[in-house]
Image (spheres, helix red, strand yellow):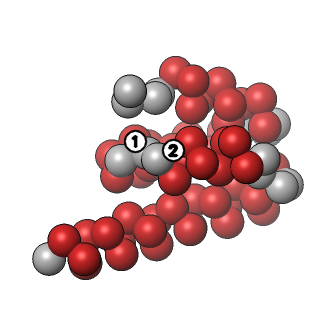
């Protein structure tokens, strides 16, 4: 069961990163690592929020304000 959940999380991360790349261009490694560190719930919130992003600064600000740590 855990393996299935991990695979689901990885697929979600991959999809969010692809959508962000398509919308904003190349995602810097630092931001990519922050996205990969997100648990599922914030990752799903990011998937919705990215529709409103127009710059990498928007992504960076969202990550800063929604960091679960």
Label disc, if present, on residue 8 of the rendered structure? none
Label 2: element kind: helix
Q: Is residue 23 left or right of residue 36?
A: right
Furthest-left residue in this view: 1
Label disc, if present, on residue 46 of the rendered structure? 2
Query: Do we see residue 23 in this rendering?
Result: no
Give percent across and percent down for residue 8: 35, 72
Q: Quadrant of the C terminus?
A: top left
Q: Are marks 1 and 2 in contact (CB under 8 Å)?
A: yes
Q: Quadrant of the N terminus?
A: bottom left
Query: Do we see residue 49 in this rendering?
Result: yes
Label disc, if present, on residue 42 of the rendered structure? 1
Give percent across and percent down for residue 50: 62, 45
Q: Is residue 57 left or right of residue 45?
A: right
**What residue is at 36 percent from the left and 75 percent from the top?**
7
**What residue is at 25 percent from the left and 70 percent from the top?**
5
Q: Is residue 39 left or right of residue 55?
A: left
Give percent across and percent down for residue 66: 47, 28
Q: CA distance from mark 1 to mark 2?
A: 6 Å
> What is the number of callouts on the image?
2
């Amino acid at each position: 069961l855990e393996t299935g959940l991990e695979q689901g999380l990885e697929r979600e991360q991959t999809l969010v990163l692809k959508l962000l790349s398509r919308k904003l261009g190349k995602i810097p490694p630092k931001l990519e690592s922050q996205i990969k560190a997100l648990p599922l719930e914030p990752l799903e919130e990011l998937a919705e929020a990215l529709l409103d992003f127009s710059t990498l600064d928007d992504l960076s600000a969202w990550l800063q304000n929604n960091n679960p740590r």
